[in-house]
Image: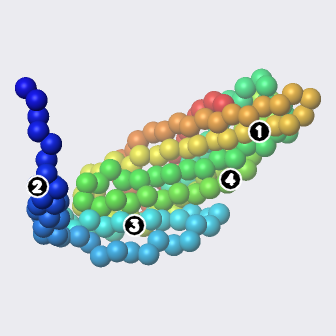
Amino acid sequence: MRQRKATRREITALIAAALTVLAMIPVAPAQTLPERSAGPTTYRVARVPTAARIEVTGTLVLDVTLRVDADLPDGASLAFSGTAAPSDDSYIEEVDVYSIAAKVANHQATAKVTLPYAWLVASTEDKVAISVYVTGTYEGAASFSGNSSFSTTIDLPKNGARTTIDLEGAI
């Protein structure tokens, strides 16, 4: 069976109906995001608050140990970054930190990534997803370029807590 093409009038009416429906959806007011800097940055986009508003503050300390590929020699530099976000359907929260440097020694590198946070959550039963990203390059007798990422999930820390998480990965 052959379908007919919609007329311009039908398409216009459909678009008008869709815009009318969209105009009825409540939206949170727009917020200005901070400029990105080398330090920790929290981005907060709040949905229409229908759930409890619980503020949880603290610090996550990621102690990262990385096994390094044989192609990356001692003394090569690696850059670490980290992200943490609670798994809350009512609020979208995230904290990031960029460019924590580390040197390779004996096919290993370690870094301490500190993520201070202030999150709005609807429940203290939330989980927190933590991700670490690593990039490494080396230009010498042999060239190397690579990246790696790894993650874990933890229970939402208690308010005011300093929580240390040991993470291991490879590049």
Q: Quadrant of residue 159?
A: bottom left
Going from N to C along the chain, the mark reached first, 1 or 2, is 2
Q: Left or right? Give the position of 59 relative to 49.
A: right
Q: Which residue is label 3 attached to?
A: 44
Name the residue beneath numbered marker 1.
137
Q: Amino acid at mark 1?
A: Thr
Residue 63, visible in the rendered structure: yes
Locate the C terminus and report the quarter of the image it occupies.
Answer: top right
Question: Marks 4 and 3, Cα distance to the nearest angstrom?
Answer: 23 Å
Q: Position of residue 149 (x, y in %)?
A: 56, 37
- What whole-number distance in Å separates the C-alpha atoms at marks 1 and 4? 14 Å
Q: Could you say where residue 49 lies in the image, as x and y percent from the top left?
A: 21, 69
For residue 10, the mark is: 2
Badge 2 element: helix
Disc 3 and disc 1: Cα gap in Å? Answer: 33 Å
Disc nearer the start of the sequence (3/2): 2
**Mark number displayed over residue 100:** 4
